Each structure stands twice: as C-alpha cells, then as structure tokens.
Image (cartoon, rainbow, N blue to C red):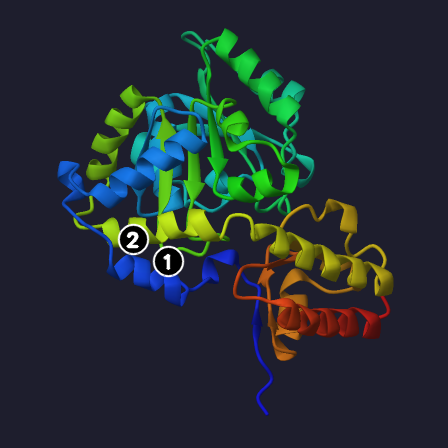
Amino acid sequence: MTVPVVDLRSDTLTRPTREMRAAMVDAEVGDDVYGEDPTVAALEAWVAALLGHEAALFMPTGSMANQVGLRLHAGPGQEVITDHLAHVLRAELGAAAAFSGITTRSWVADRGLLDVDTALAVMVPDGGAYQVSTACVVVENTHNFGGGTVQPLADLRRLREATAAVGVGVHLDGARLWNAHVASGVALADYGACADTVSVCLSKGLGAPVGSLLVADATRIGQARVWRKRLGGGMRQVGMLAAAGLYALDHHLDRLADDHARARRVAEAVALVAPGVVDPATVETNILVLDAAAAGRTGAELATAAAEGGVLGYPMGPRHTRFVWHLDVDDELTDRATDVLTDLLRRRGA
C-alpha cells in the first residue's frame, strides 16, 4: 500500500477541480489585449468591486502584479520601503531595480507585522537633492515569510492616513488577502481602502491554475495596462483562465477557513511534544512555520527528514521550515502530517 505524499511546500500547488475545469472549457473568450475578453472583464469588475476600487487588471503572475504596481508609484532613482521579510524584496529577484530602476530600503519586522512608527521613521517623503525620496510603502497581508501573519486593520489605516498626508503611496501585496479576510472577518473593501494599489492572487489558496490582479483607480489601471504589455504580460484569449478565477471566488473563498483550522491543529500538536518549535497563537491562517533550530536542526534538515516521512515542506532559511495548507490537503492528509511531524520532533527530544 502506497503511503500518500502530503505536499505542503506551498498553496500554489493546488490543482483545478473538475468543476473549475468545466467552467474554463465553457468560458466565453475574446482578445484581452484589445480589451475584448468578456470573461476577463467580468473578473476584473468583480475583484475591483470587492476591494472598493474603480478598476482591476488581470495579470499572469503575482510578481508582475506587484512590480507593475510599484512602477505606478515610483520611477528610476526613487525608493520603495517595506519590511525585511517582504515578498517584493526576498522573492521577486530584484525586479524593481532590474526593470524600473527603483531602490529599496527595509526595516526589521517581527513575523512581518507592520510597525507603523518604524515605517514612518524610515520614510523620506522629499529627499531633495541629497537623499533618495520615498515614493511608496509596501505592506504584505497576509505575510508569507512572516508565517501567514494578518496585519491589523487599525495599523493599515493609520499608515494610509500618514502617507497620504505627505504624498507617499501605499501598495498592498495581497497575494493572500483572501486568507486575511476570512481569518479576521474584515471586509475586503476595508483592506482595499488602505492602499492606492492592491495585488491579489488567484492561484494560491483559491486554487485557480494561474493569475493575479492589480486593483487601483481607473487612471492607474490604464497606465498598468501599458506596463503589462511592456513587460510581456499582454495575453489574448485568456478568458479560460479568468473563468477559473471567477469559479474560485464563487466556490473556494469561504473554505479557506478549513486550511486555517488544519494548520492550527498541527501547530497545537507540535507544540505539545516540542515546546519552543511553534507558538500556536501565531498560526493565524494557512501557513505553519516551525523553528527547526529549536529542535536542533536546520530548516533544510527538518524539511529533508519530513520528506522522508512523506510530508513535503519548504526550508525558509537556516532555522525555519514552512508548511502551507491548501484545498488539496484534507483532514486525512493533515492527520498524516501531524503524525510525521510530531514523531520527528518528539524523537529529537525538542
């Protein structure tokens, strides 16, 4: 009997369901570069409305949505600031510098939590002739490398008010904003009101095979359309992919709570056998980060040992290993992951 592999490396591993595939096959399509794909237009209108903005633009990837968003705020020689764990700094391969000539600075953030006072202290709204001027502050919600951290709405509102007063923009990297919404109960439009531009992803917990959107006012989205084409992201009969996003929003949004509950359940089991490896109170959404060093291992060593037991995780650095729940991991597979991880950590005497 083959032992099933529990693949928790990322929530990008989700596969489209049979019903989602059917919706894709039946989608009405047109040429989106000419703005003539009705399914794309429907998706863009729905997401813009959900987030309380005027318009949205469908993108092939979340990184492109983020990078086009940053380019709308900052040009060559200007800077974007964010925390040291942010995806736009750690996982987008220096794209802001490579494509747009944008420089970046960061501050250290515990679990990626927004520290408004620190962000404002780092910010230089008008550097004049002697310093780089800050054009934009980036906030990530939920925070990937922070462990699925949900940003408090009060802090987001305070940042938005302070930056608007001095002409600095806010970009919200909301790749997993759906998770923040489900976990906190905060309306998506309330999150959207805290930023000038917002990116959201369809191909993580929502389970679409590909796609993200950038949301902003109509003028910015018009500019974004140019930058999308310039960066090679103009797509033609892409309504088949947009249909997957429409299906995901209609059927897979509320079920994100199941992923959150499963991640928390494993965190609680691990904490019982290995105190110090994880604090279950910090597992707010679908991401579980284990402190492998607290168990006498490196992040890579823990990932390798878990993989030998059939549970795949992602080594985030020298001391941490990440496990991410998604719609292809049910209760049975979660129980399997619990058994493997607790056995590993108990045997090491953590």
Q: Residue 209: which numbered mark, if any?
A: 1
Position in image of residue 94 (x %, y %): 41, 41
Q: Percent x, y for residue 122?
A: 58, 20
Q: Is residue 32 left or right of residue 70?
A: left
Q: Tell me where residue 268 sits by quadrant.
A: bottom right
Q: Residues within 10 Å of mark 2 (few under 14, many from 20)?
A: many
Q: Is residue 96 visible?
A: no
Nearer to us in this view, 161 or 350: 161
Whether residue 11 sits left or right of residue 155 in the image: it is left
**Which amino acid is tagged 1?**
Pro
Residue corresponding to mark 2: 241
Kindly identify the residue that appears in the image at 66 percent across and 26 percent down.
115
**Foreground pick, 25 / 93:** 25
Locate the N terminus by quadrant: bottom right
Dot 1: element: loop
The residue that appears at 83% across and 62% down in the rendered structure is 274
Q: Amino acid at mark 2?
A: Leu
Q: CA distance from mark 2 to mark 1?
A: 7 Å
Q: Residues within 10 Å of mark 1 (few under 14, many from 20)?
A: many
Disc 2 element: helix
Q: Is residue 339 left or right of residue 69?
A: right
